[in-house]
Image (cartoon, rainbow, N blue to C red):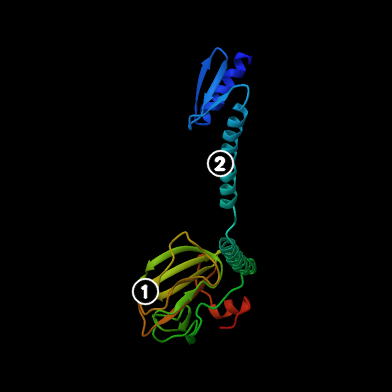
Amino acid sequence: MPSLPLVAGVAVLAISAGGAVTASGAGVTALTSSGSSLDAQGSIGSVAGQALSRRGAVVSRSGSRDSTGEETDPELVALAEKQMAEREAKLAEIRKAAEKQAAKIKENKWLLPLDVYQITATFGQYGLWASYHTGLDFNGNTGDPIHAIANGTVTSTGYDGAYGNKTVVTLDDGTEIWYCHQTTIYVSVGERVYGGDTIGTVGATGNVTGSHLHLEVRPGGGGPVDPFQAFVQHGIVP
């Protein structure tokens, strides 16, 4: 006669197979859903085998479904690769621009303040001014961009009588550069600027007869010197 643990195990397997279990003096009989009986010592193994077979089929289908879900979509891969290539190209462009700007800052060469201009008045001239002309006039159109001629820090901005809208940039050696008669001023006091940066636009504010940039060079923040000669000393001929 089977032991008690074996009988209990047979009963569980039989129930899971969709039947019921009855006990009698001769042993344990499992009743299937169709009504036929299986004794514990004989055909119960067949019932358990069928139940396990069905469970195994379920697990197999689940595993197949998971495997299919993990497959990689070729279109997504192609899109990711395209985005990565575009990102690398943009980073390379940014690096190139940064290197160019760093080289320009390191050299700190003087640059001309306007892209297109004519010199209409020079330093020391007499005529329209109370005493003599204290700067160099670059003729231009209202709205033309004005570039910083060298690296420095903005130390003054605003309206200044005959000078009109004026920006003062103090260079690293203490020289002040005055940009006068501007229409607009794009920088503020304390801001660091570098040669070539746009700091404002040409205008006709203050005591003028037409649109132009009046530029003065004042070493150490003192009296004005001839800007033309200052440009030549820094390798630029206006």
> What's the residue at 51%, 77% (across, down)?
113
Residue 31 percent location from the top left of the image = 51, 26
From the viewer's perspective, is the residue at label 1 or at label 2 nearer?
2
In the rendered structure, which amino acid carries the disc numbered 1? Gly
Q: Residues within 10 Å of mark 2 (few under 14, many from 20)?
A: few
In the rendered structure, which amino acid carries the disc numbered 2? Val
Residue 24 percent location from the top left of the image = 53, 14
Residue 72 lies, with reference to residue 128, above or below; the image says above
Tell me if residue 163 can be seen.
yes
Most foreground residue, 134 or 117: 117
Residue 133 lies, with reference to residue 26, above or below; the image says below
Most foreground residue, 43 or 215: 43
Q: Secondary structure at mark 2?
A: helix
| Residue 58 picture quarter | top right
Left or right: 19 with respect to 157?
A: right
Residue 47 percent location from the top left of the image = 58, 31
Residue underneath mark 2 = 58
Most foreground residue, 185 or 65: 65
* Tag shown at residue 164: 1
* Tag shown at residue 68: none
